[in-house]
Amino acid sequence: MPKFTIPKEEYVCKGHSACPGCGTPLALRYTLKALGKRTVLNIPAGCGGVILGVWPSYALKVPVVDNAFECTAAIADGIRAGFDVLGVKDAYVVGWAGDGGTVDIGLQALSAAVDRNANIIYVMLDNEAYMNTGIQKSGCTPIGAWTTTTPVANGKGWNTSPKKRIMEMLVANGIAYGATVNVAYPEDFIARLREAKDIKGTKFIHALAPCTPGWRIDPRKSIEVARLATQTGIFPLYKVENGKYSLTKEIKNRKPVREYLRLQGRFRHLPEEAINEIQRLVDEEYARLLKKIKETNE
Amino acid sequence: MMEVMTANYAAAYAVKLARVGVIAAYPITPQSSISEKLAEMYVKGELYGKYFLVESEHSAMSMLIGASYAGARTFTATSSHGLALMHEMLFWAVGARRPIVMAVVARALAPPWNIWGDHMDVMSERDTGWMQFFCENNQETLDTILMAYKISEDRSVMLPSMVIEDGFILSHTYEAVDIPDQDDVDDFLPPFDPEWKIDFDDPRRFGGLTMPDWWSEFRYRIALDQEVAKKKIVEVDKEFERRFGRSYGGLVEFYNCDDAEVALVLAGSAVGTAKEVSDKMRERGKKVGVVKLKTFRPFPAEELKKLNDMVPVVGVFDRSYTFGYGGALYSEVRNGIYVPGGGALVKNYVGGMGGKDFTPKNMEFIFEDLLRIKKEGKVDRMVEWINIKDGTGRW
């Protein structure tokens, strides 16, 4: 096995306007390190578009096409179609959307792109709410979380719907490749994108990235919190290739979800019984994942 | 080569002749036969480019914006609710300066459900910044699509175009259409070569955040380039005539107007009816003229101002209505030709909406009404709805 290296080239410039501790610039760095210079990103409304800066400057060394909220997969497939017609072969087209722009308003275009098996890489930057507009609940907001549209008062009112199972939807649709990645695990992040980039068809990367103001965390702890998401099994790292599931990060002894929740202000209101319930749901979901791994590899 | 075909097929042949790179389509009545014909051509290997099926008109327009950024010539077609669903991305196409050409088969919007011809859909998009060209017949549909690429892709313009054909009246009616030779079209329409596109060696960002200080400057450029487009449209129409022997007046065509006593301004397939009725009435000594509004955006206000010197009374026929005021063409024409303290009297006629028959008899009624106004010297009613079942349709 050749030694695993992370390219030294930086495609994200200094001077972007992300908050301290934000996971997005890390995710952008890892993605572009894995894919290289001949990559075009298309970015809809969301933090991803704003932190790159204000015209006429921007903080990436690759071309970027900004677009409307719900059309990331369609625009990306359009760019790919244009390249195909014009004979541009050695370029990667990346749709870079947030969780709301993917599992909510962008779901229709994404599902159609998978239906066409569009030859694109779709990265969903998951910070678990509409953070760019000020922390409103999205389809990816976890159970128990406070947001400005799931406010908490008198010991109730937090988000009660489970995170949408976007990977399951896309796998059911027959997506070529899907993987979860976490900014706290850069080697794994880069390895998954390297794996995805030359597979023909639609590739989906579900990237967890903390939002310090939205999650109500100390910016210095954002990587620690992100790592705990995987260590507790709340956000397991796995991939699905041709329908086969496998864990990409083995977690021997899962930590209690309490450790993850208690570091974040957005879960501060949760009573013990709610935390126990979340633990039960996470265990259940984790067991479901292990079962899928077993079943699809038999 | 002459062939008998519908306007929808004529549009498909134009797309083939224009060597479009990326077509994205979603079916909607009465546009569907454009998508179907293109799909058939694609499967037979007759198209230069690629044909993509999308799940909605919103994605169709999105995909074309992406493909255009990559440097490909693009086409889609839509109608009615499909156009309304695209609304958001129509703004993006303009702001991104992507010279997409789209056939719009004009149709009513529900409820009640109505699949027939009407201009409410296209008029609702007049403020997006798209150029809008109306077609009188099937030949004009084919020719206008070819011209639209040349105008849109001109580096001094770089704005998208809608080529509008009336639902069913043209889209499903067979007429003889001359299909130009591919070589002649290639000579007329060079490959798409945008100044700005995705370039990995010179990476740029397209459409990113702009602060208030600069945003209006981008709008201002669009406004200026719509003015540039007016000259370009006339120029391309003249070149087209030189090469193919057909002209559509560029922005406006004045028909039977030289010695006219009254004139009627209108757009789309009803122009043909108006011309025929005008000819017939002239045989009876009634000097009525027709003004064909070929280009609605950019709006040819200067050209229409000439009407003040030509006739004392101008009628405007609308297949749409801006609720609470009058037809869209009416308000535009009236404002466009306005001169302080004088000018022609203007009256609005609304009819033929939602596919309602609009007959030569109706047209004759309008011309007679205009002649009456000329005689009386005043407009008693601002708007008149033609052929309304209950009520007078007058106020």
Image (spheres, rainbow, N blue to C red):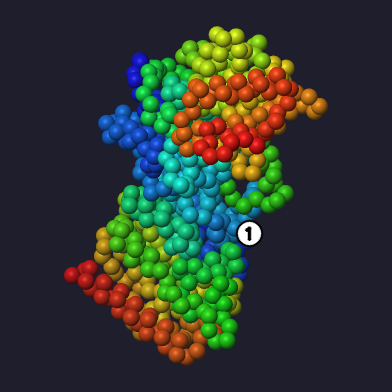
Q: Position of residue A177 (x, y in %)?
A: 32, 59
Quadrant placement of the C terminus of chain A: bottom left
Letter of the chain that mark 1 sits on in the rendering: A
B126 up-or-down from A237: above or below = above
Residue B63 appears anywhere in the view: no
Point out residue B59 in the picture as x, y percentages from the top left corner: 44, 47
Q: Residue furthest left?
A: A298
Number of residue marks: 1
**Which amino acid, mark 1?**
Gly
> How crowded is the residue under tag 1: few (<14 C-alpha within 10 Å), some, or many (20+)?
few
Q: Residue furthest bottom?
A: A272
B156, B310: nearer the viewer: B310
From the viewer's perspective, is B221 left or right of B62? Answer: right
Viewer-nearest residue: B236 or B36: B36
Task: Give the residue drawn at x 37%, y 38%.
Answer: B32
Q: Which residue is situated farthest in the front direction here? A: B391
**Lateral position of residue B306 relative to residue B235, left or right:** right
Relative to B203, is B48 on the left or the right? Answer: left
Residue at left 21%, top 69%?
Answer: A297
How far across and how far down the image is residue A120, in percent? 39, 51
Q: Is residue B162 above or below residue A161?
A: above
Residue B233: give x, y in percent of width and height.
58, 24
Of B173 and B129, which appears nearest the observer? B173
Asked if residue A113 can be seen in this view, the reply is yes
Q: As displayed, is residue A115 above or below residue A213?
A: above
Residue at 58%, 15% in the rendered image: B255
Give the residue displayed 45% in from the left and 35% down from the top: B355
Horizontal relation, residue B307 to residue A43: left or right:
right
Q: Quadrant of the N terminus of chain A?
A: bottom left
The residue carrying mark 1 is A15
